[in-house]
């Protein structure tokens, strides 16, 4: 997450590699959060793949969907409006499931 707070786009490749390699749910969530904060478009495809992955943990899928909303043009993602009343990625499961179903 610290790399994300720095906003250093040179960390994107490292974070994408860690996202691919990590088997720990927490590590993956932190990589997703850092990528979202950096806002580099190179992370979009990996986040879409994670959000759509049937084998990924639900929390990681939700974090990926949230990350996409932070990186992308929010006006083009109307279903994101359901997340706006929640301040973090721990949105209630029905809200998260609805958003993931609309990817």
Image (spheres, rainbow, N blue to C red):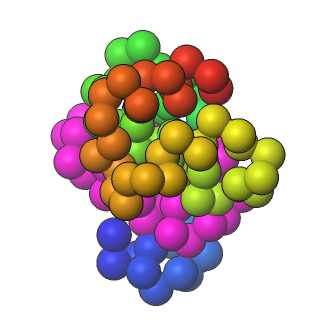
Could you tell whether 87 is left or right of 43 in the image? Answer: left
Toward the top, the furthest residue is 54
- Residue 100 visible in the picture: yes
Could you tell whether 75 is left or right of 103 in the image? Answer: right
Residue for point 37% across, 60% down = 87
Quarter holding the C terminus is: top right
Could you tell whether 14 is left or right of 88 in the image? Answer: right
Residue for point 41% across, 31% down = 96
Given residues 101 and 9, the one toward you in this image is 101
Q: Position of residue 64 (x, y in %)?
A: 47, 42
Q: Position of residue 40 (x, y in %)?
A: 66, 64
Q: Main secondary structure of the magenta part?
A: helix
- Residue 28 visible in the picture: no
Q: Position of residue 76 (x, y in %)?
A: 79, 46
Residue for point 49% across, 23% down = 98
Residue for point 71% across, 42% down = 77
* Number of numbered discs: 0
Residue stretch rendered in magenta on the structure: 18-46
Q: Position of residue 78 (x, y in %)?
A: 71, 40
Q: Is residue 89 magenta?
A: no
Q: Is residue 29 magenta?
A: yes
Toward the front, the furthest residue is 85
Quarter holding the N terminus is: bottom left
Given residues 93 and 22, the one toward you in this image is 93
């Amino acid at each position: 997450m610290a790399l994300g707070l720095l906003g250093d786009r040179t960390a994107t490749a490292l974070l994408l590699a860690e996202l691919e390699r990590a088997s720990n749910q927490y590590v993956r969530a932190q990589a997703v959060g850092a990528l979202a904060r950096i806002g580099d478009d190179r992370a979009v495809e990996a986040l879409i793949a994670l959000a759509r992955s049937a084998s990924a943990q639900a929390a990681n899928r939700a974090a990926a969907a949230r990350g996409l909303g932070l990186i992308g043009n929010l006006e083009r993602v109307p279903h994101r409006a359901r997340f706006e009343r929640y301040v973090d990625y721990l949105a209630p499961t029905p809200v998260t499931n609805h958003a993931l179903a609309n990817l």
